Amino acid sequence: MTSSIKITADLERVAERVLKLAKTAGLDGAEIDAAANTDALTRFANNTIHQNVAEQTLSISVRAIMDSRTARATTNKTDDESLARVVAAAASLAKNQPRNLDLLPLLGKPKYQKVSRSFSSTAETTPQDRAHAVAKVCKHAAKHKQTAAGIFVSGSSHSILANSKGLFTHYEQTRAEFSITILESDSSGWAKANSPDIHKIDPQALAESASEKSAQSRKPRELAPGHYVTILEPSAVLDLMGSLFFDFSGTAIEDKRSCLTGRMGQKLFGENITVWDDAYHPLQTGYPYDGEGQPREKVLLIDRGIAKNVVYARATAKRAKRKPTGHGFSLPNDFGEAPMNIVFTGGDKSVDEMILTTERGVLVTRLWYIREVDPYKKILTGMTRDGTFLVENGKIAGGVRNFRFNQSVIEMLANVEMLGPAERSAGEEAFEMVVPAMKIRDFHFSEVTKF
Amino acid sequence: MKDFAALALDTAKRRGATYADARVMDIRHRDISTKNGEVGTLSESESLGIGIRVIANGSWGFASTDRLTREAVQACAAEAVAIAKASAIAKTEDIALAPESAYVDVWQNPYLKDPFRIPVERQIDLLLAADKEMRRVKGVTVAEGSMAFRRIDQLFVSSIGSSIHQTKVQSGAGIVALSFSGNELQKRSYPNSFGGQHMLKGYELVESLDLVGNAQRVGEECVALHSAAQCPQGQSTIILESSQLGLQIHESIGHPIELDRVLGMEANFAGMSFLTTEKLRKLKYGSDIVNVVADARLEHGPGLGTFGYDDEGVPAQCTPIITDGLFTGYLTSRETAASVGEKRSGGTVRCESWNRLPMIRMTNISINPGTWKYDDLIADTDDAILMETNRSWSIDDRRYHFQFSTEVGWEIKGGKKGRMIKNPSYSGITTEFWNSCDAICSRDYWTLWGTPNCGKGQPMQTMGTGHGASPARFRNVKIGVAFSK
């Protein structure tokens, strides 16, 4: 395995070569984003490993700036000819477009808050380590006459962001993820966790949780569609929140495509909803800077129900006469920026307490295929999946067939009766967030499927 | 390319692989977008690397690298074998592949104009001209345009002796108008939503779309939606225009027929399928007029699911999926074909890039044209809603229950197209829906649509699929649920 120090040094050398080539080519400015990733994924189904993959990838992405024009070209080759070609390609694309008089000069040398999200134990995980863990959970499933399917992932990434104005910064992170679905003939259960530190992942505990959900949801009954008191576990909350926070963007407001258009400063959500974007939160991951190298700031997005702030890339901030918050995507792009490190303040109620206080309701483990129906009312549709239960008289009364929902998430966040402690959650429809479980009034399930 | 591919096979075999294949892929992208008179995305990228797939100790292993040196390729092949041996720690039975012949061939899709040789300023000018036409319409708040071009140059070799060099050139383009007014954000796209139309063609596809000529209409329809009537709720006859029917096929036929999904291999992420194997040649999937094929051959058309050979070296084929309403076929691979009694793979295995494992993917899943002229179909319909251009789509993880919304609807009353309807949506159960189809328009109205963004697998792979469809009518469908209270 190539050492982390060597990978970083190799990327630094590539960045320096690209900046020299850009200078020789006579560009007004250049920015380079060089990244090296190593990833491995062991995938299992039917209680056996059916896919086991590893990859090493490199990306050298160059942004050229010429006479108020900018464009990007990317390669994965590092020989001199390829690097010269990628610089020339970016320059050629840039010069053949109209001027953009709003284009800002490159950033200088900002100071960054240090974050530490790289663990050698994660980077050094072997296929054998993953296979042994998978074999154990498959045995657990087989012992309970169940079938397991899932993934065990480990990997690391290194990147350099540099520009011709002196910015030169490095970031590295590791990642580990375990996800499992346990199936029976008419039921299923699911659990997932991820972390930069593989020691924070407990495959056996996740398998046991999924196994229990599958057993508890056997022989699902069909409930009539309607409005239910609904307890959403953190992963279900996460997946619903995914599309909401892309609207907390200065560009989305400017384009009038945000559900916050004309609503900033209004109390849209419940008093118990406070949300930050915080790249430095101990349960968060990711870069301390944005696509241009602007340091990420901690931003209060929702303050006790009030839509308080949105985030700004440098150019959007200038147009809006605000300060950039360090949430811009790599340039050039159409979407400007988005908060990607969502942290809810959460509450103190456990899911068990939520169940105990529910006379009749629905408990949801996971949601699936969530799509936007109305972007301003923020109505989303989707399905429940892998562990949906009827709650009656303070207890889980058994599994129910999966529902389709059509629900405004703005109304949903105004109807939250209880919040759990915010925890790092993983789903399949949104990026990871620090979110709580929620007990919600009047959640709208519009139809039922066949299983 | 050839030397590295041969080295990969040789190393894998020496390390103990009983089967090996390798794909060297050189992929080039160009992406352009405009928004409100300015260039948004403007980027090109290239990616070259090798993916090596092996069977050792009866299990699969896969490794990939973009370091194309002798040492790196040998290390990558050795890693693939080591991973396969680790996989065997949790195996229940040995992998067996359906037999396939060895092929030595070169294949390239035909095209007239290489999109990468068209000056980028000409491409930008076209998008900006369409953008200007859309923004001429009062009430349009955002005008967007996009073009995407791909060239995939790929060598496949396998330990059974195949060596197949394929080159695919793909183009796509589209425009979108958005209008915000009151408490409503409306949208119209052309020629399709989510990036427009995409095909295995050159720049001639973009020129044929007449983006500028359609831009004003797109803007006007978008603004007009604000004052249109809301889609009612209830049961109704609906007519789906062809791009929406293409997506309906994708979600409610294309995915459920993926045999890896049926066999549980996708259970943790993409989900499973209601089409369990005992339903083959027994289930009445649709009405008698519904005939669907999975056709990767060039004679089907230059779709995103068209190729010479799949990524296991199996030649492109046409498989009948629904025949006179009866469910007759799955999408299969060399590993899965035997489980449904097939002696040979249906040739549907593809990968997104050199660093991704090939897996079963839709090819061109198309409904055969019917006999109706479009005007006759409208004239024959007493009371219905015609729905155009997808706006949102969702289906459960076994592909039973779906809900779709479209950008615009039109009331059909007494055989005539009437007023505009906003926020149209419909929902249903897959087999009930397809059995309610009572009219399909003829070949004259049939379009092979491209879906460039189909996601599946872990790690996630995005793949282009093709869907030929002509407008069709469905009876007694639930409408308007998406906006129900």
Image (cartoon, helix red, strand yellow):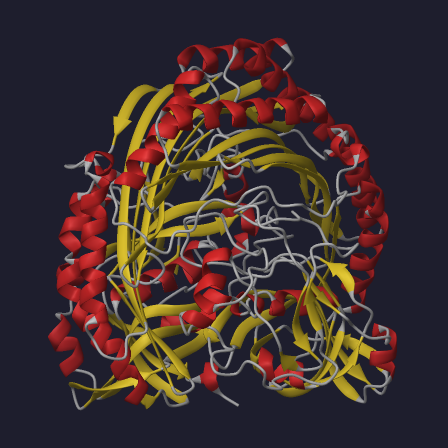
Q: Position of residue A438 (x, y in %)?
A: 75, 76
In front of the other: A173 or B432? A173
In front of the other: A79 or A135? A79
Q: Is residue B265 above or below residue B2?
A: below
In front of the other: A66 or B356? A66
Q: Is residue A195 visible?
A: yes
- Give the quadrant of the N terminus of chain B: top left
Horizontally, is A169 left or right of A115 in the view?
left
Q: Position of residue A9 (x, y in %)?
A: 64, 23
Q: Position of residue A349 (x, y in %)?
A: 86, 76
Q: Position of residue A285 (x, y in %)?
A: 70, 50
Q: Is residue A272 above or below residue B18?
A: below
Q: How many marks?
A: 0
Q: Is residue A435 above or below residue B61?
A: below
State which quadrant residue A299 falls in.
bottom right
Horizontally, is A66 left or right of A151 in the view?
left
In front of the other: A52 or B35? B35
Q: Residue at x 85, y 48 (%)?
A: A204
State which quadrant residue B417 falls in.
bottom left
Horizontally, is A428 left or right of A360 in the view?
left
